[in-house]
Amino acid sequence: MAEPTGVLWERDPHTAAKHALLRRYMSAWFPIMAKQFRDVGITFLDGFAGPGEYTNAQDSSPLIAMEQAQRTEVTRWRTQTRLVFLEARAGRAEHLRNVLDSRHPPADRPSRLMLDVRRGKCVDLYEQAIADAGGWSGPVFANLDGWGVDTDYSIVQRIARQQSSEVLVTFQDQFFIRFADGEQEAGERVFGHSGWRAVDQKLTAEKAPFLVNLYRQGLHDAGFDYVLMFQMVDEGGHSLYQFFGATSEVAVEKFKDGLWEVDGVSGQRFRDPRDPHQMAFDIREPDLSSLRNTVLRLLDEREHSMAELRQHALRETIYKKTHVSAAVETLVNQGKVEWARNGRSHADQVLRRASRLF
Ligand SMILES: C[S@@+](CC[C@H](N)C(=O)[O-])C[C@H]1O[C@@H](n2cnc3c(N)ncnc32)[C@H](O)[C@@H]1O
């Protein structure tokens, strides 16, 4: 999407789907974290906050955080809850303040909810703003939803060092593909090194996979054990990547629950960027063909237990652990794989490629 110039602009379908996903995940994140981190408090950072609404929608990431942080499931724990919103453009920061104040008047806010809206660049402000809020004592969820080319790697690294923290980053590959031989400074900031410039030497079909894999590796290197990446595709075929970095399995599971629930919102589909054959998934009738191919590929290498296959699905694919049983069942019925052992636990249920008779 072309960068808008006014204070407000129209919400596109990608953004609508992103909001649905964020709302779904935050409805789990706030209560779970508020309960678990009662002693140190929790922080939601919106590094690219925007004006708080759109010409055609009253929703936005800061308003979603505000709404979710005030639910009784959260406030009942009396946990210090900090919302830090940063926005580079003065008019948008001002608009956001006004929207927040009119929809959530300060007098009505829970006493342990702290809100800070600052104008300026995320990279310049975030560390001090979180420090001033007391946020470096506990977990931080950082929504880094810029135009896809503007999240400095240093921010991701800093959040990764913070215990139990998570990032959700918007990433746009086309910018880097177009400017690999020109505007290199942005690339260096986003990737944290110059290795991304090799995209210039790749064949056209390899460029996007190269960049998203490199970025994914960067999140791992920063310290996120779990990195989920997915592509949002609209009916016009426009796409935008989202990267979710977390340090706990539960976080990825919850995030995937949201992803599968929200798929289809506003005509958006999510897909796994590493699998060019997979179109998009549908919650009502998930297309597990890509997962079945993954299982076959793994079993071509060696026997795998269900526990291993479930872990692989969670960590390396867009699928949930619970999808593995259905994929395996089909493969067994098709005679492509067989049980080497079929015990009670997932670790004890071991699969192998079926011996081919013909
Ligand atoms: C994609 S919009 C954010 C939308 C918002 N997260 C939402 O869900 O409604 C990106 C916003 O980041 C702001 N922005 C751009 N560069 C920035 C920077 N370096 N630091 C902070 N804000 C920035 C833009 O002015 C714009 O309002």
Image: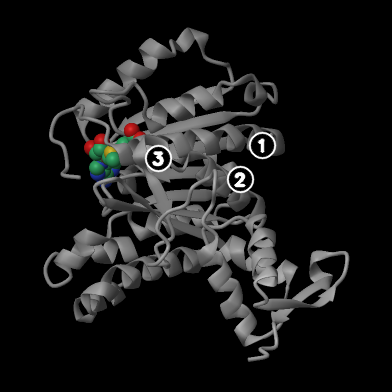
Looking at the image, which is closer to me, 245 or 281? 281
User: Around disc 2, counting alpha carbons within 10 Å, would you say few (fewer than 14), some (14 to 19), or many (20 or more)?
Assistant: some
Determine contact: label 1, label 3, CB under 8 Å: no
The answer to which of marks 3 and 2 sits earlier in the sequence is 3
**Residue under pointer 1:** 32
Determine contact: label 1, label 2, CB under 8 Å: yes
User: Around disc 3, counting alpha carbons within 10 Å, would you say few (fewer than 14), some (14 to 19), or many (20 or more)?
Assistant: many
At label 3, the amino acid type is Lys
Question: In the image, ligand 1 is in what quadrant?
Answer: top left
| SS for callout 1 | helix
Q: Residue at x 41, y 25 (%)?
A: 63
Per the model, the C-alpha gap separating discs 1 and 3 is 21 Å
Residue 94: percent from left, percent from top: 26, 22
- Extreme residue toward the right, this view: 344
Q: From the viewer's perspective, is the residue at label 1 or at label 2 nearer?
A: 2
In screen coordinates, is 163 left or right of 142? right
**Residue under pointer 3:** 18
The answer to which of marks 1 and 3 sits earlier in the sequence is 3
